Image: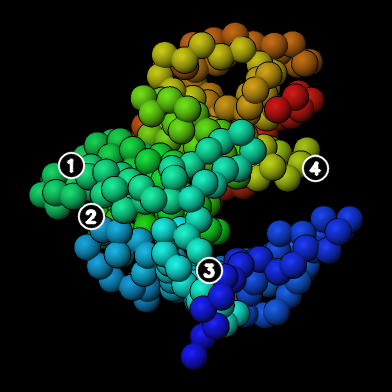
Amino acid sequence: MADESKGSYTYPDTPGDPDRTGVLRNKFGLTRHSELGPADYAMTHIRQSEIAEGRGPSGNFDKEHLKAIHGYIFQDVYEWAGHTRNESPIVDGQRVEPIGSLSKGSTSFLHGSRIDFGLDEALKPIRDPNVLRTGTPEQFAERAGQVLAELNYVHPFREGNGRAQEAFIAELGRHYGHEVDFTVISKPRMIEASIETTNDPSSPAMKHVLEDSINPNRREALRAAFADLERCGEKPFEHNIRTARQGEEITGQILGHDDRVASIVTDERIIAVDRADLPERLPNDNTEVSFTARSDFSRLGREQQATEAHIRPQQAEPQRDRSAGLKA
């Protein structure tokens, strides 16, 4: 029988050693962050891939389905996988108390006592399958973005919220005919969107995240920006990168471009834009350019279709010019 005394999600801290402070109890018995992190991500990556292949838990896209997805992803790492913060699972033979208050940095999440209510409210936009079945990709992005933002505020699990939520939304998209590819969304971008929508639920930041992950032309533009960063010796996923929105006023330096996409370094982030929105003649130095984004990136798709229709001989990738230093 499990010991009913008060347990803990974490191992005892080692004073003066941050690597051994606040380490979650795990099935590997690893007591250092530097050891647990790689092991966690290696095992959960396998489970996430299985879900993407359609081998994960099925459900009705309700809170039980979300818990099942979390349980599937983290089954090899944590005993409490699939349990929300308002529950009392057994961890290392002891029952842990529910977690009420939870925060990260300056962001506070919903109190644990209100998680069931919070999940019910967060999932309301996707409750009607008929609305999802007949909606456009843009309408899906709006609803899914709203759900993702609300789930992030609820933060139902002690750990692994982001991975579980993204898998949940990707499965929702797959079920209703939309490919949701979060591999084009960098961690700084997702963190910024999460903070913005937590502080201001009316913010379109998470909707834009979903638009970028669903629209194949926007995904292409983001990958072009990633390639520009790599050619500059940078790690793309350490930068806040997004596509331009129609009507957006942009000022920045040109990091790289070809005849389809340009990467603009602004004071706050890197923005992938349609090359057609820029002046025909571009500066050869680090001079800033200012312009209004007009494109919805559909031109990229039309050009791709035309290329495939003509079955032209495969050509080498156009050389992308690079001129700007990095500020974002």
Image point (83%, 63%), residue name: 14
Query: Residue drawn 58% across and 27% down?
Result: 271
> Which residue lies under the disc numbered 1?
135
Identify the mark nearer the N-term, 1 or 2.
Answer: 1
Q: Residue at x 22, y 45 (%)?
A: 124
> Which x, y percent locates residue 197?
44, 31
Q: Which residue is mark 4?
A: 233
Q: Is residue 304 above or below residue 24?
A: above
Please give the residue where the numbered disc 2 appears in the rendered image.
Answer: 176
Q: CA distance from mark 2 to mark 3?
A: 38 Å
As rendered, which of 58 and 110 lies closer to the eye?
110
- The residue indicated by pointer 3 is 96
Residue 325 occupies quadrant:
top right
Task: Estimate the x, y position of residue 132 in percent, counting from the top left.
Answer: 18, 47
Helix, strand or loop status at disc 4: loop
Residue at the spot 53% in from the left edge and 68% down from the top edge: 96
Q: Nearer the viewer, mark 2 or mark 4?
A: 2
Secondary structure type for disc 2 = loop
Residue 149 pos. (x, y %): 40, 39
